[in-house]
Image: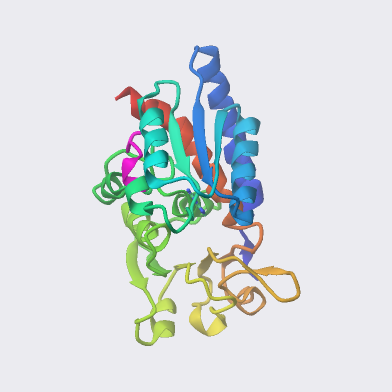
Amino acid sequence: MAIRIDGKAISTEIKDELKERVAAYKAAGTDICLAVIQVGDDKASTVYVSNKKKACEYIGIKSLAYELPEETTTEELLAIIEELNGRSDVNGILVQLPVPKHIDEEKILLAISPDKDVDGFHPVSVGRLNIGQKGFRSCTPAGVIQLLKRTGISIEGKECVVVGRSNIVGKPMAAMLLAENGTVTICHSRTKDLASVTKRADILVVAIGKPKFITAEYVKEGAAVIDVGIHRMDDGKLCGDVDFADVEPVAGAITPVPGGVGPMTIAMLMNNCVESVELQKQ
Ligand code: GUN
C-alpha cells in the first residue's frame, strides 16, 4: 500500500516556518505586503482570494485587497499595477485569474514587475526558472517539489514523467524536476501510447484536467504519483486526475484529493512573498 503524501500537514509545516521568518523580519523592522487584485465576483476566485488573505494573516504578511468591479478596463487595471510596481511598501502583486474576457490578460501579466511577480507567471520569471536563475517559481509545481522533498522522495536521476503541458503547471513542473536533476519527459494530448511512457515513471505528475483518468495500468509498481487535478463529481465529492482507489495499491506514494497538492499552492505563494524580500534587495 502506498504512503499517502499529506499535503495539508506539509503545507502547515511550511507556513509555520514562514511565520517564524516573517516574525524575524518584523523584529528587524521589515514588513512584508502582498497586493491581491480581483476583478469581478467569480465565486471560485472569491474563495481563492479569501484563502490567500487568510494565509497572509496567519503568517503575519500584510495583504492589500483590491476588489474591482467587473467593468474595470485593461487601462484601469494597468494603472493600478503601475502604482503598485512603484510602491516600496508592496513586495508582491497578484492578479487573480481568470480576469473578465474584455481584459487583456497577457498585457496585465506582463505589466507586473518581475521582481514582484509572486505567482511566477511573468515571462521573465519563466525564463529565470529555465536558466536556473533566482526568481519567483510558479506556486503549484513548486509545491509538488516540496511534497516530494519533505516526504523523502529523491528526484535526482529518477525517471520523471509529467502529464500535461500548461504554462502554469506542466511546463514549469518539468523545468523544476530537471533543475533537481530528474530525467524528465512531458506527455500531452497528442502523446502516442501514453501508458507506455507513464509506466516508465518513478515520479509521475498528472495535470491534465480529466477526472480519474490515470488508472493502475498507467503506473509502475512503487512509483510516486502526484495528482494536480481537482474536480467536483456529481455526488458532490472531490476527485483528482488519478483514480485514487485503483492506483493506491500499486503506487509507492500518492497524493490524495483533497489534501494533497491543493494546500501547497498557497503555502508556496506565501513562500514567494517571504522570498521577495531577499530578491528585492539585489
Ligand atoms: N487562479 C487559479 N489559480 C490561480 C493562481 O495560482 N494564481 C492566480 N493569480 N490566479 C489563479
The residue nearer to you, when weighing 178 against 51, is 51
Give the x, y percent position of residue 114.
32, 38
Residue shown at the point (57%, 57%) measured from the top left: 261
Residue furthest to the front? 71
Give the x, y percent position of residue 157.
34, 61
The number of callouts visible is 0
Give the x, y percent position of residue 278.
38, 27
Instruction: Point out the stretch of residues depicted in magenta.
Output: 109-115
91 to the left or right of 184: right
Q: Residue 135 occupies which quadrant of the picture?
A: top left
Residue shown at the point (31%, 38%) measured from the top left: 134
Q: Residue 16 occupies which quadrant of the picture?
A: top right
Q: Quadrant of the C terminus?
A: top left
Residue shown at the point (38%, 35%) measured from the top left: 79
Tell me which colouring the rendered structure shows: rainbow
Give the x, y percent position of residue 80.
42, 34
Residue furthest to the right? 235
Residue shown at the point (35%, 81%) measured from the top left: 191
Q: Is residue 111 magenta?
A: yes
The residue nearer to you, when weighing 134 against 179, is 134
Q: Is residue 86 magenta?
A: no
The residue nearer to you, when weighing 210 against 194, is 210
266 to the left or right of 104: right
Determine whether 1 is above or below 275 in the image. below
Q: Quadrant of the N terminus?
A: bottom right
Q: Residue 188 occupies which quadrant of the picture?
A: bottom left
Residue furthest to the bottom? 193
Determine whether 122 is above or below 29 in the image. below
